[in-house]
Image: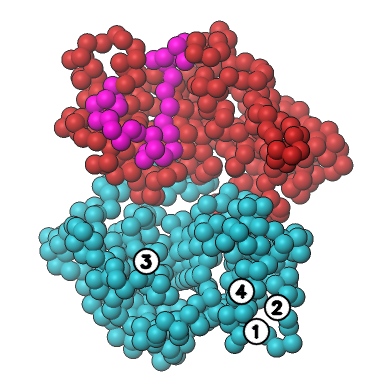
Amino acid sequence: MTVTQETLIGGGQPSLLEVDGLSTHFRTTRGVLRAVDGVSLRVARGEILGIVGESGSGKSVLAQSIVRVLSPAQLALSQGSIRFDGIDLMGLDDEGLRALRGGRIAMVTQNPSTALNPVFQVRSQMLETWRFHPDRRRSGVDAESRMLELLAEVQLPAPERVARSYPFQLSGGMKQRVAIAMALMGEPDLLIADEPTTALDVTIQAQILELIRNVRRAHGTAVILITHDLGVVARLCDTVAVMYAGRIVEYNRTRPLFERPVHPYTQGLLGSNPVFGRRRSILTAMPGQPPDLLALPAGCAFAPRCGQAREQCRHEEPRISIGQDGFYHRCPVAAQSAEVESEDCRR
Amino acid sequence: MIELRELRKHYPIARGGWWSRSRSLLRAVDGVSFTLSQGESVGLVGESGSGKSTIGQLVLGLIAPTDGNIVYDGRPLPSGPAAVAALRGHAQVVFQDPYDALSPRQRVREIVTEPLRNLRRHHRAELEELAVRALERVGLHAHDLDKYPHQFSGGQRQRIGIARAISVRPRFIVLDEPVSALDVSIQAQVVNLLMDIRREQGIAYLFISHNLAVVEHSCDRIVVLYLGKVMEIIGTEQLHSAALHPYTRALVDAIPIPDPALGQTTAPLRGEIPDPANPPAGCRFSSRCPLATDLCRVAEPELREYHPGHWMACHRHAELPFSAPTA
């Protein structure tokens, strides 16, 4: 189902990133895998959007689809619209995409080692961004001093020494800082961070999260943060999209989503997460496990695990319910009970 | 039931490469003492290099300590293969990665009955019955006996690992990051299962984890480690009322709480975790501790019991602030 642009968030004001009805299906030997299915979202300038989901929910493929790094050969379907600052990314050729990636749109991955080339010094890798994106250079600043400035900004001790280091000489936390500094070389408008702290120790994770917060404050960078950690979302994000089996099941501003989760899957996620300082005798675990994306059930993909599922959920595609502010969820049962409530109020 | 006394495990490491043969010692575990009582669940918490997994291996007799000893039921644990023999049928282990911990070429039947077969006490029919009982306890079925691990999801594989561990009715299980590789919804199922089994069978757990929230939920007491040393031992109930060790405090503050209504968190701990082969002098935490004084950088603090059941190694224990309510 495609959501028209007018109905979504922001009203008439154009967002930095507007994704509408995005679907990415892969061709596999066992059939077509619907990794991302009909996803729509908005990211305003300077906004942090969190995308939460478990393994296989499609959150990383969504990020890869937005920057269009997936090889067309393996795709069975790639449709929808992606507009970045007015530019139609779906219609852009390789050259146009290359000019944006690493420049106006930068990416940080879970494992910083994969983002850094092991045989080159940090210095040459950072300066490469500068060479490829002449349009992103600040006037009157040379590459070398900008690099050192950024390495200092991400709180690396002795930036000169780090610049001359090879990746193996740095710890995991330091490599992730370098990766972020490298992403900032192109002065990005949008930073996509895919599980940036998952491989790091807690105290180092706290440092990197603070760093992302500071980057947004200092540069006005919009961020898409992909994570499985609800705590990280609550601490950092303005808006949240919860994904399940390739779809956004609930999309809202962070506070209302945590305080009044509508979709049973969101409620389940919040219930099964142990929270420090709020010990319960038992965690409210969700039964079952996420579905096989190659053999999705008819109707709502969450219905087999859902305590609130009705007969309709098992064969009807869940209808999308869009609120006045443009945020939405995909649970018809929740939508119906909300309608009943509001009618009761009117009486 | 188990007592660790001044346990040490040092590894010699070569530094600098073949041209400069300087040798030094990595003190993975450096003088660790604590106890695990019958039916108790003790959490072992720490970041990379804290020595928590090494302690797990030592307790299971899989590696021999450099110094110190482990007392099991009042008798010191022998070293080498004799340790494994002494613990056979008493101790079990569940590993972090359910994909690595199970042999892909064994059927569930062989996996689950392996510890039982090692005991050489049961007939084939009995083995089958005990395996089915263990499988059913973890939510799997008799018809799963003939399947291979690849036919199961990550959460189900972890259940198979737990079935293998409980098949012999052990007295204690070392759980080495048992839920860290699992998704949140599956993690909750496995944590609940582990807690139920413990309540029913009175098995003691040594619960190794980097996740304080999971440990708080699953354990009676928590041992906090940093670079091979115990920083603090504290009852889970005391966590929110006692003044905490500065490192424990930092760990607690670093946990992102899933509540957007909470205000800005305190500033995160600065600096990297030091190289375990080259730890700071004095208190191991002194290089990152916001309260460190000159004394902390030269003299190592002793682990002392300041309140019943609450042990801490900190020179500044008298000045520690009471923990702010976290929620």
Q: Which residues are magenta?
A: B84-113
Sequence-wise, which precedes: disc 1 or disc 2?
1
- The secondary element bearing badge 2 is classed as helix
- Image coordinates for residue A270, horizontal then vertical, percent: 40, 55
Residue A189 x/y as whole percent: 54, 80
Mark toward the start of the polypeptide (1 vs 4)? 4
- Report how far apart the C-alphas of labels 4 and 3 lie in the structure: 26 Å
In terms of secondary structure, where does tag 4 sit?
A: helix
Query: Could you say which quadrant of the image residue A19 lies in?
Result: bottom left
The residue shown at (46%, 67%) is: A50
User: Residue B7 shows which numbered tag?
Assistant: none
Whether the residues at callouts 3 and 2 have beta carbons within 8 Å, the answer is no
Q: Which residue is mark 1?
A: A137
Residue A61's label in the rendered image is 3
- Chain bearing mark 3: A
Q: Which residue is mark 2?
A: A143
Classed neighbour count for the residue bearing mark 1: other residues with Cα under 10 Å, few (<14), some (14–19), many (≥20): some
**Which numbered circle lies on residue A128?**
4
Q: Earlier in the sequence, mark 1 or mark 3?
A: 3
Q: Say if residue B46 shows up in the picture.
A: yes
Question: Up-down: is B235 above or below A326?
Answer: above
Q: Residue B39 sits in which quadrant?
A: top left
Q: Are the numbered discs 3 and 2 placed on the same chain, yes or no?
A: yes
Q: Is residue B310 visible?
A: no
Q: Magenta stretch containing residue B97, yes or no?
A: yes
Name which residue type carries label 2: Ala
Taking the image as shown, residue A5 lies to the left or right of residue B297, namely left
Q: Which chain is red?
A: B
Report which colour depicts chain A.
cyan
Count the numbered circles shown.
Answer: 4
